[in-house]
Image (tube, rainbow, N blue to C red):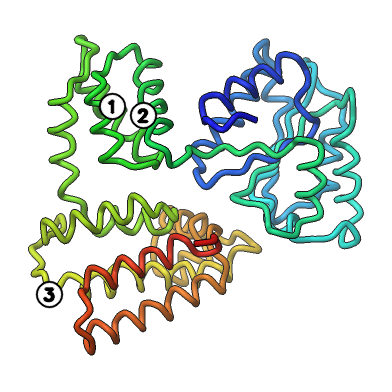
Amino acid sequence: MADRFTDRIQQWRKEMQEGSLPSVVLLLGQSDMLVRKAVELLSDQMFQKGGKDLNYHHFPGDSTRPADWLTAARSAPMLAKRRLIVATGIETWLKKDSADDPGLAALAEYVRSEKPKGQIVLTATEVPARSWLGDQLKQAGAVVPFDLPDKPADVQDFIRQAFRKRGITIDPGAVTALADALGASPEAISAEVEKLAEYAGKAKIITAQDVEEMVQRLQGHDVFDLNRALVQKDVRKALTILERMFHNLLDARKKVSASGLPLFLLSSSFEFELRRMAVAKKFEATMDVAGLAAALKCKDTAASIILNNSRKFTEAELEAGLDKVRDVDRRLKSTSIAPKILLEDLVLTICLAGKKR
C-alpha cells in the first residue's frame, strides 16, 4: 500500500473494483473520521445499486466475538452481491492468542476465502507488537493504514482535495498557511474547510488573506481545544495550541497571567480530563454511557465522548499521565525550569503514550 494518504485511497478503490481486496481487512487509524471515511468508501463501492440497509452489519468489537462477525459474513446477502460486516475497536482481540477463542482461527482462515458472502472490516488504532491476529492479517496483506501522515506535503494535499470536492479553488499560499495553522488533524482541517467553504460563497475562491483572517481567529484557542487535542493524542496540534496560549496569555473567557497559566492548565485541563477518562475505563467493557454520566455527573452525550476518548489510552497510560501531572505541579513550585518547557514535556508524555519516542 502506498505511503501517501490519497494514494492509499486510490489503491484501495482499485482493489475493490478488481475484487482483489482481502475478505477481511483491518483499518488502522487514530482518526475516527478517516476510518469512517474508509468504511463509507467501501460501502459505496459494494452497494452502489442498493441493498445496504439489509446487508450492512455493525458490531462493537469489545462486546461481541469473532464468531458473531463470521456468522453474519457467511449469511447469504439479500438483494446485493455481498454483505458488509464492520467490527469497530477490536483492540482486545488483537491482544489474544488463537487458543483463547476458536473464532480467531476461523477468522484468519476466512481471510483466504476466494468467494466470500461477506466483506469483514475491522477497525483499531494500532496493532500490538505481539498480536496473533495482527500477524495473520499482515501476512495476507489485509492491514490498511488509514491515517493522515504528519508530512506537510500530505497535509496540504488533503486540504486541496477537500476544497476541490466542494468545487472551490484555493491559492497555494493559502494551502500552506492552513496546513501550518492546523497540523495533521483531519477533524480540525475538515471543520475549518467547512467554515471557509461557506465564507467563499458563490465566488468559490479562497485566498491567502482569507486564511490569514481565519488563523488570527484561531489564535484565541481555549482550554477546550487543548483538551480535545490531548484526548485525541494529536501532539502537533496540542503543542501548537499551547504555544499560542502562552503567546496570547488568555483563554476564551478571561485573561491569565504568564505565571498563572501553567497551574491553571494543570487543574482545569490536564488532570481533570485524565481523571474523567480513568473513570470511563471502568465502563468500557459494558459501554454503559448512562452509568458513566451518573458517575461523572454530566450529560449522556458528554459521557459518550469521554468513553470513546478513553479507548485511546490504557489504564497504565492514564495513571502515568496523572503521575506526570503531579510531578510537573511539584516542579513548577520548586524549580526554576521554564513552565512552558514543563508543560510541553507533559503534553508529549500524554499524547505519545504507548508510542516509541
The foreground one among 260 and 308 is: 260
Amino acid at pointer 3: Ser
Q: Is residue 148 left or right of residue 347?
A: right
Residue beneath label 1, please? 175
Identify the mark at residue 156; answer none if there is no mark: 2
| Secondary structure category for the residue under label 3 | loop
Residue beneath label 3, please? 259
| Secondary structure category for the residue under label 1 | helix
> How far apart are labels 1 and 2 at the CA level?
6 Å
Q: Above or below — where is 197 with respect to 256?
A: above
- Contact between marks 1 and 2 (CB within 8 A): the answer is yes
Q: Above or below — where is 51 with respect to 116?
A: above
In this rendering, the label closer to the viewer, 3 or 1: 1
Within the image, what quadrant is residue 10 found in? top right
Q: Residue at x 62, y 51 (%)?
A: 126
Q: Earlier in the sequence, mark 3 or mark 1?
A: 1
Identify the mark at residue 249; answer none if there is no mark: none
